[in-house]
């Protein structure tokens, strides 16, 4: 038995018919072809599929698409504006915050939520904020540096740690 | 993996949810925050044929303080509890426990009612409910009833809530002045399930004597457990290091955790002693009457 749902993703409203068992992560990737959201573990451990649901981060492998009916979602595709990388994405690029890139969508969505809550996060707050996302490449160091650099650039400070 | 097929019911009221449960008594599961149920479904360890989604039910998300009781709507998100000034002031133990529940992303979705109804023996909220002698309110076709924490947890992920009942409210007592509390956990990584979780709550009078002590443990048995024998070691005493150590020793002697992937039963037992002692010390130091101890 399928259900018709209406969701807004990155400002665009979609109407689709889905089976209740369809995970939101799979809905984004398969039905909306928004493949920036990555699916790693499918059981809420790796955090790669993290998106924003009505502004709050959530693991899209732990929600069913039917639950997103009427919701406002943001995925990694929604971070850049008019083709320009957001300051956070720019900082990840400049500070080697991504290596293979698999965890990057989850890292960016968690870091974006953090930077909306606080303009000047401490290193431990950054580590806490990204602790729900597993990275198997960088050892987190460059990711933390990237978030720090993004915070300072969003405060309008010059990038002292630029490489 | 992917979950198996199920019928989806979007409940819009408590009556609606109860009605759906009554129609599908043994096949339906309540979908609250989904942070435990959906992983189980993705693994196909759980395959309910009907899911009753209570995320759209109005009036199940609130935090109220009335007459010495903190009441939480079952669908109150853990993230809302973490951000609540009422909780920070009236139940710092719950705030400390909340920060140990998964990660913020998990707490944005996870609910207090869902965590308690799921009754994972390693989880934080069931241990807090048991330590504080809280209650849950459940509603079914035959009406409403209140279940005290001591009668709620039956075995692993199993409670005395009937399949046709919905948990609607969680109630915790506000503790008197002179109370200190702590929730400490041993785990491999921050946000993981507790290998051993220790809750300690002590109420100390103006003379520095312990009027009431509460100790609960997570992760060491099929349900969270209270350690009444160890509590009685503390009651009526000055909470000296020796008294705390004796209570912690009693706790370790009272539990018989099994071996698992993360630790042997013997190791867990040794850690019960260590973590209860640390939690008791922290609770004592937070009671505000430390100068008299």
Image: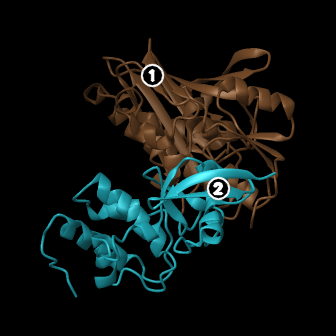
Q: What element does badge 2 sit on?
A: helix
Quadrant of the rendered structure where residue A41 is?
Answer: bottom right
**Would you name the residue on which mark 1 appears?**
B64
Which chain shows up in cyan? A
Relative vertical location of residue B187 with respect to residue B246 in this rendering, above or below: below
Residue B229 location in percent, x, y? 61, 29
Q: Residues within 10 Å of mark 1 (few under 14, many from 20)?
A: few
What colour scheme has been applied to the protein in the rendered image? by chain
- Mark 2 and mark 1 in contact? Answer it, CB < 8 Å: no
Q: From the viewer's side, name the closer residue of A96 and B277.
A: A96
Give the distance between the C-alpha atoms of the residues marked 2 and 1, in whole angstroms: 32 Å
The residue lying at 61 percent from left, 70 percent from top is: A29
Residue B115 location in percent, x, y? 61, 41
Quadrant of the rendered structure where residue B42 is?
Answer: bottom right
**Would you name the residue on which mark 2 appears?**
A65
Relative vertical location of residue B102 with respect to residue A46 in this rendering, above or below: above
Q: From the viewer's side, name the closer residue of B286 and B101.
A: B101
Residue A139 location in percent, x, y? 42, 79
Chain that bears disc 2: A
The residue lying at 32 percent from left, 76 percent from top is: A85
Q: What element does badge 1 sit on?
A: strand
Which chain shows up in brown? B
The residue lying at 67 percent from left, 45 percent from top is: B120
The answer to whether residue B151 is seen in the rendering is no
């Amino acid at each position: 038995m399928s259900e018709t749902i209406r969701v807004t993703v990155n400002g665009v409203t979609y109407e689709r018919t889905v089976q209740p068992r369809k995970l939101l992560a799979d809905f984004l990737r398969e039905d909306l072809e928004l493949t920036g959201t990555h699916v790693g573990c499918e059981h809420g451990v790796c955090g790669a599929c993290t998106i924003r649901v009505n502004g709050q981060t959530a693991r899209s492998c732990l929600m069913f698409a039917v639950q997103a009916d009427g919701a406002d979602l943001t995925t990694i595709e929604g971070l850049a504006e008019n083709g320009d990388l957001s300051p956070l994405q720019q900082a990840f690029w400049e500070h080697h915050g991504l290596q293979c890139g698999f965890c990057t969508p989850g890292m960016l969505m968690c870091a974006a939520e953090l930077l909306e809550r606080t303009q000047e996060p401490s290193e431990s707050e950054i580590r806490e904020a990204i602790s729900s996302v597993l990275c198997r490449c960088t050892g987190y160091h460059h990711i933390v540096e990237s978030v720090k650099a993004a915070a300072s650039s969003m405060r309008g400070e010059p990038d002292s740690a630029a490489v | 993996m992917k979950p198996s097929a199920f019928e989806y019911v979007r409940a819009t009221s408590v009556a609606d949810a109860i009605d759906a449960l009554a129609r599908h008594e043994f096949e339906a599961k309540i979908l609250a925050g989904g942070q435990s149920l959906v992983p189980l479904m993705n693994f196909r360890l759980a395959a309910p044929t009907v899911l009753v989604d209570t995320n759209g039910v109005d009036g199940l998300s609130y935090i109220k303080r009335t007459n010495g009781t903190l009441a939480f709507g079952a669908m109150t998100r853990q993230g809302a509890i973490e951000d609540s000034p009422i909780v920070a002031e009236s139940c710092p133990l719950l705030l400390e426990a909340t920060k140990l529940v998964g990660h913020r992303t998990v707490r944005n979705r996870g609910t207090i009612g869902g965590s308690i109804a799921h009754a994972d023996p390693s989880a934080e909220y069931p241990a807090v409910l048991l330590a504080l002698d809280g209650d849950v309110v459940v509603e079914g076709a035959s009406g409403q009833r209140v279940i005290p924490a001591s009668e709620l947890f039956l075995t692993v992920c199993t409670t005395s809530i009937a399949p046709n009942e919905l948990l609607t409210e969680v109630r915790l007592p506000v503790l008197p002045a002179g109370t200190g509390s702590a929730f400490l956990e041993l785990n491999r990584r921050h946000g993981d399930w507790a290998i051993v979780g220790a809750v300690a709550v002590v109420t100390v009078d103006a003379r520095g004597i312990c009027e009431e002590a509460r100790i609960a443990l997570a992760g060491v048995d099929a349900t969270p457990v209270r350690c009444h024998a160890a509590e009685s070691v503390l009651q009526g005493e000055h909470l000296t290091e020796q008294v705390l150590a004796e209570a912690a020793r009693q706790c370790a002697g009272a539990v018989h955790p099994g071996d698992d992937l993360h630790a042997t039963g013997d190791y867990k037992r040794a850690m019960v002693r260590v973590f209860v002692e640390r939690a008791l010390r922290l609770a004592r130091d937070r009671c505000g009457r430390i100068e008299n101890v």
